[in-house]
Amino acid sequence: MSKKAQTTNATPSLVELKLAVINFHKGDHLEYTRTGIARDACYTSHNSIKWKLEQMSKIKEDIAILAPTEDLSEVVQVQLAKKVDIYQSMEEELAELQERHDADLQVYHMITGEVWSAKPRRTGAADSNSVLEAVKAILA
C-alpha cells in the first residue's frame, strides 16, 4: 500500500483522535478550554503550512539559480539533484501538513459549529483610552 493511500485512509481516524483528545475535557464549564484547544490546533497547523511554503520557496529560488542553461558541471549537477530531492520531500511533507490542517479544521467545526479562519496580526498598539477605560471598569 502506498503512503498516499495510507494517508487518505487515516484522515477519519485522525479527526476522531483529535476530537477524543479535546473531548477529554468534559463538562460545560470546560467548553472554553475545548474551543481554545481546537482553535490553537488550527492556528498551529496553518502556521506549519506557511512555514513549509516559505522553505519551499527558498529551495525553488536555489533551483532556479542552478537550473540548466547549457552545460552543467558535475558539481552543479550534484547540487541541483540535491535541491530537487529536498524540494520533492518538502512536497510530501506539505501534503501531510495539509492533511493535519484539514483534520484540525474539521474538529474545530465539530467543536464550535464555526469555520476557522486565520486572523490578521494586530498592526499597532491597543488604543490607550479604551485600555484605561477597561482598567477603570475592572477596578471599580
Image (spheres, grey):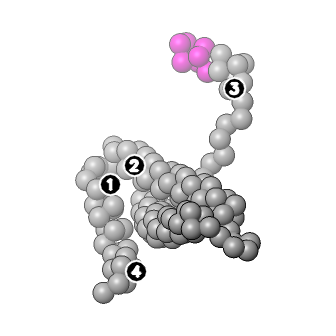
Q: Say if mark 1 contacts mark 4, CB within 8 Å.
A: no
Q: Secondary structure at mark 1?
A: helix
Which residue matches tag 3? 125
Residue 22 has which mark? 1
| Picture residue at 28% right of the left edge, 49% below the top | 25
> Quadrant of the image for the N terminus?
bottom left
Q: Is residue 35 left or right of residue 84?
A: left
Q: Quadrant of residue 16?
A: bottom left
Q: Which mark is residue 4?
A: 4
Which numbered mark, 1 or 4, is in the foreground of this view?
Answer: 4
- Judged from the image, the secondary structure of the residue bearing numbered disc 4 is helix
User: Picture coordinates of residue 112 (x, y %)?
Assistant: 46, 57
Q: What amino acid type should be assigned to the residue bearing mark 4?
A: Lys
* Residue 57 disc label: none
Question: Which percent across, then down, holds residue 86?
Answer: 50, 64
Tag 2 near tag 1, CB within 8 Å: yes
Q: Quadrant of residue 117?
A: bottom right
Q: Which residue is mark 2?
A: 37
Mark 4 vs mark 2, CA separation in Å? 28 Å
Q: CA distance from mark 4 to mark 3?
A: 45 Å
- In the image, the segment drawn in magenta is 133-140
Confirm whether residue 110 shows in the render.
no
The mark nearer the N terminus, 2 or 1, is 1
Give the number of the mark in front: 4 or 2: 4
Quarter of the image holding residue 74?
bottom right
Is residue 136 in the magenta section? yes
Indicate yes or no whether the magenta region holds residue 71.
no
Residue at image location 32% in from the left, 54% down from the top: 22
